Amino acid sequence: MIPDRNEIKKALVNLLEREGSLSPSTVYRALSDHFGLSTSDLAKKTDTNESFFEKEVRWAKKDLVDSGVIKMPQQSGRGIWELSVKSEEELSPILAYSPEEIERELSKVTLSLSPPVGQKKPERASSSGEIFARDVRVVAYVLKEAKGTCEACTKPSPFTKADGMSYLEVHHLRRLADGGTDTVQNAIAVCPNCHRELHHGRNKTALRDLVYSRISRVVRE
Ligand SMILES: [Zn+2]
Ligand SMILES: [Zn+2]
């Protein structure tokens, strides 16, 4: 059975997150393996005699380009599919810090003391200007204050990591690329589902407003 377009979109983002940049033919092969497509699924043609499955994958890719998740061909080069830097930065939970660094900071955080100052103007860590150096103390403080509960949906973190910590991702309510600060007033700890929704959901603004009203630490920027 050929999966629906939303399933294809999800699988495509996961694939590119894992593999970096890929050619369309590699994507078709990897996704057809992922979905366990049969020979007859793959033989299915469109009216114009193209592979139906490959056309669905191209549709999913186009939709992800339109929403800014995958780079436009002018940015990535023709025949190369790649997540845009912004989404890589935002989707990866805590870029640039090793688990050990975060662990070390977590052990130092005491919630009763005043929170770390963070950075009002986060420094750009790459020449392309899209990756920002984040303050590991802000990450640690926010994770500690969340106590293993998503600050958007209030559900418990989906799993415990190998190091025994609850898995949550740190999200900036106003994006650093849009001038948001890297401070505990602009950062929240959320589950992966809420994180995706805060970036790509139809109701992302409502969800963000809910966070602003519920979490006393955060301040609108
Ligand atoms: Zn959540
Ligand atoms: Zn985010």
Image (cartoon, rainbow, N blue to C red):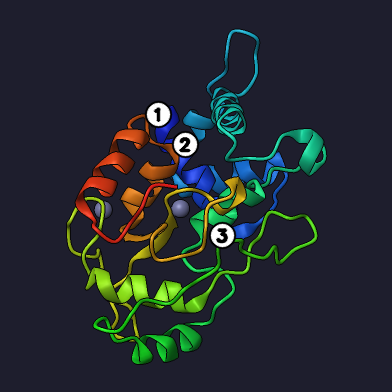
Q: Is residue 37 visible?
A: no
Instruction: For marks 2 and 1, give the CA distance.
Output: 6 Å
Of 24 and 86, which appears nearest the observer?
A: 86
Instruction: For marks 3 and 2, give the CA distance.
Output: 15 Å
Given the image, on which type of amino acid does mark 2 rest?
Ile
Residue 119: quadrant of the picture? bottom right
Label 2 belongs to which residue? 8
- In percent of the image, x 59 and y 32: which residue is there? 61
Q: Residue furthest left?
A: 155
In the rendered image, residue 2, in percent from the top left (x then y), is placed at 43, 30
- Horizontally, residue 46 falls left or right of residue 130, namely left
Task: Tell me: is circle 1 under 8 Å from ligand 1.
Answer: no
Given the image, on which type of amino acid does mark 1 rest?
Asp
Of 215 and 35, which appears nearest the observer?
A: 215
Q: Are marks 1 and 3 in contact (CB under 8 Å)?
A: no
Mark 1, other Cα within 10 Å: few <14 / some 14–19 / many ≥20: few
Residue 18, numbered label:
3
- In percent of the image, x 45 and y 79: which residue is there? 137
Given the image, on which type of amino acid does mark 3 rest?
Arg
Q: Are marks 2 and 1 in contact (CB under 8 Å)?
A: yes
Residue 123: quadrant of the picture? bottom right
Residue 120 position (above or below residue 213): below
- Horizontally, residue 211 falls left or right of residue 32, namely left
In the rendered image, residue 51, in percent from the top left (x then y), is placed at 61, 24
Helix, strand or loop for disc 2: helix
Residue 4, numbered label:
1
